[in-house]
Amino acid sequence: MAMWIQAQQLQGEALHQMQALYGQHFPIEVRHYLAQWIESQLWDSVELDNPSEEAKAKRLLDNLVAELQRKAQLQGGEDGFLLKIKLGHYANQLKSTYDRCPLELVRCIKHILHSEQRLVQEATNVSASGGSGGQAMDSLSQRHQQINQAFEELRLATQETENELRKLQHSQEYFIIQYQENLRIQAQLSSLSSVPAAERTQRETTLQSKRATVEAWLTREASTLQKYRLDLSEQHQKTLALLRKQQTLILDEELIQWKRRQQLAGNGGPHEGGLDVLQSWCEKLADLIWQNRQQIRRCEHLTQQLPLPGPMEELLSKLNADITDIISALVTSTFIIEKQPPQVLKTQTKFAATVRLLVGGKLNVHMNPPQVKAVIVSEQQAKALLKNESTHSESSGEILNNNCVMEYHQATGTLSAHFRNMSLKRIKRSDRRGAESVTEEKFTVLFESQFSVGGNELVFHVKTLSLPVVVIVHGSQDNNATATVLWDNAFAEPGRVPFIVPDKVLWPQLCEALDMKYKAEMHSGRGLSEDNLVFLAQKAFTSSSNNPEDYRNMTISWAQFNRESLPGRNFTFWQWFDGVVELMKKHLKPHWNDGAILGFVNKQQAQDMLLSKPNGTFLLRFSDSEIGGITIAWVAENPNKPGERLVWNLLPYTTKDFSIRSLADRISDLNHLLFLYPNRLKDEVFAKYYTPPLSKAVDGYVKPQIKQVVPEFTTPNPEPSGGTSAFMDQTASPSVSHPNNFGSPDLQLKWGDVKRACSDFLMYCLLNHTIIKTEPDSLSKIYLTFIFIHNQFI
């Protein structure tokens, strides 16, 4: 109910948009009286594109109707009588409307709730934000107000030409009557030859006088009619100019901005939103354009009915051509992709997409539902399409289930085609350029259809291209394909030739893209700080400068981003960064959002930070040497040299380590870790993530538990009651080193270490259900292996 309470506080245009969500398809009274019940239902759990979910939707419909009827029965007294009748009527209305299509009810309510949430969020941002944020919202409000004022101006202009057209029609009809009267007088004069001479003279004089009067009036009126026609034509020219201006504002600015937001959403930017507002504007445009077109057609009919000397025929012909061009641009531009196909597209894998015609309902396109076809085309084919060069029947692959009929959803007023089960069966690649890899090659999904408007009066062939997609055949290619997509989404310019992007960008531009991606994957407002970005700049440019200003005007190329390996490494800058993102997303997201992970700190920085802190202080930083690795660095006394303090770095953990034991539990295992940098007790930070103690033994069996140890700092925690601990290292033996000698062989491997490692390995296998044969012969082989290892260390 909280959402409805906030929605009722909306004002101005936002309130108008909220009210427009409701109607006969879903009355606002139902939303009001069942607000708490509606907001408590799991509408988003219903998959609208899955027909098997219809039973779940039917239950929601039945429950909604039952709740309405219950609410109606609770109404009593004189004031409640009318409400009781009204709610009962709404219950029956919803039942009859959606009984055969309950998924449409779910679609309708999801649309309403999501739209309300967006409007409330936008209003909240306006009231809460100051400075540039508030100014941006003010600017948005001003643009919307400007558009609405222009619509009102167009409405008045269209109404005025309608009134003038009716006057013209009335005047022309009277002119025709008088013209027929003149013809009748002419006929009478011609018939006077059979009348006696005495009578003929008088009648002839009268008729000639009458004819002269009528002809004089016709002459004057013909000139007036011509002036009316020219004036009306001039008014239509002005209205068409206003329509063009308004259409340019909506299609070339607002719709292009929406598409840009949609593209940035592919990098983790905020959801594009605002499509319903755009549709309402496009529908208003379509309505006004069609009204003006019909007026021009009526003017043509009047001109044909009564031809008069002058340029009207040419003027009206040009007006008709201009208005047809305007409506053609509107229809073709509002055929859009509402839900983009995945931009990293794996062959033989199901994917979905949705296309929508924003003016479909207003122009009654749904009366003859069009079919949409999807094909995949190369970058070169996309360029040819935009140049209107023929690429008919050409494609770069085969998509299964690539035809779909557009459906009109009355509840939301949308005409769309939902491609639910497409699959790319095969792909045909082009010859690559230079060092370009297959994951740098871009394709696009072309959606095309044919619409008839006005009872087949106008027919439009429409097409639209998806955002560029990179086709892969194996999951190992996903990392590099994502890099191509991120670079394209971030740096593509509106109206570009497909799919050209700059080869170099300013470092702050890339920082913005990386921060957007990182925040989206973390589902957090905590993105990359300035210090984090300096660390990334040092890595990208092999620099040691800690001053952010040194990087402001530096450029980074695509090759530096994801083609050339970092110095001394076998991976690129992007591959390292993406490895961090994947690790955090899968296992460490809560700890990042808690502020427990510094992450973007190099080894020397970690040493400088920790040596100024008490022993036992530790921090978590990303590994420089391994993709998707994170290490613990801590300060402690050197076990071999009392009084000497060193900073130690644990062998990096990767995602496979955290699938065995979580980071929090691993930190809990290591008693020498006391304070999370700078001075937070580790239990205060990580205790809520510790695995609860094991239950007591049942039927005499004790469940074993894995714990991590670092041999040089082994003081394990007491055993939890009812369980035994198998102390294991981090996938072998945790390696610690002097901060200036990471992974150094100075720590001599001993036979005891080997025995412990082997026994821990066996325990790990047992705990993780690894199949180990226990026949005597197998055990003998294991024993002999131990003896062999022993001999190597004697």
Image: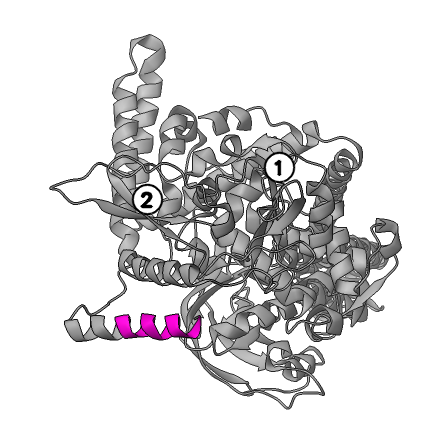
C-alpha distance separating marks 2 and 1: 71 Å
Mark 1, Cα crowd under 10 Å, few <14 / some 14-19 / many 20+, is some
At which x and y percent is residue 272?
61, 51
Residue extending furthest toward the top? 77
- Res 615 label: 1
Vertical relation: 437 (above or below) 595: below
Q: Residue at x 54, y 52 (%)?
A: 584
Give the camera-side residue of 656 and 40: 656
What amino acid does circle 2 point to? Answer: Thr
Q: x and y percent of residue 640 in the render? A: 59, 49
Q: Nearer the viewer, residue 484 or 459?
A: 484
Answer few, some or many: residues within 10 Å of disc 2's Cα (few below 14, many 20 plus, some between 14 and 19).
Answer: some
Placement of 62 over or under 538, stated as above or below? above
The answer, for residue 794, to whether it is visible in the render is yes
- From the viewer's perspective, is residue 554 above or below residue 726? below
**Residue segment shown in magenta:** 782-793
Q: Are marks 2 and 1 in contact (CB under 8 Å)?
A: no
Instruction: Label 1, secondary structure: give it.
Output: loop
In magenta segment, residue 792: yes
Residue 234 position, x and y percent, is 83, 56
Q: Main secondary structure of the magenta part?
A: helix
Q: Position of residue 706 (x, y in %)?
A: 35, 50
The amino acid type found where label 1 is placed reads Asn
The tag earlier along the polypeptide, 2 or 1, is 2
Q: Quadrant of the C terminus?
A: bottom left
Which numbered tag is attached to residue 97? 2
**Residue 199 lies in quadrant:** bottom right
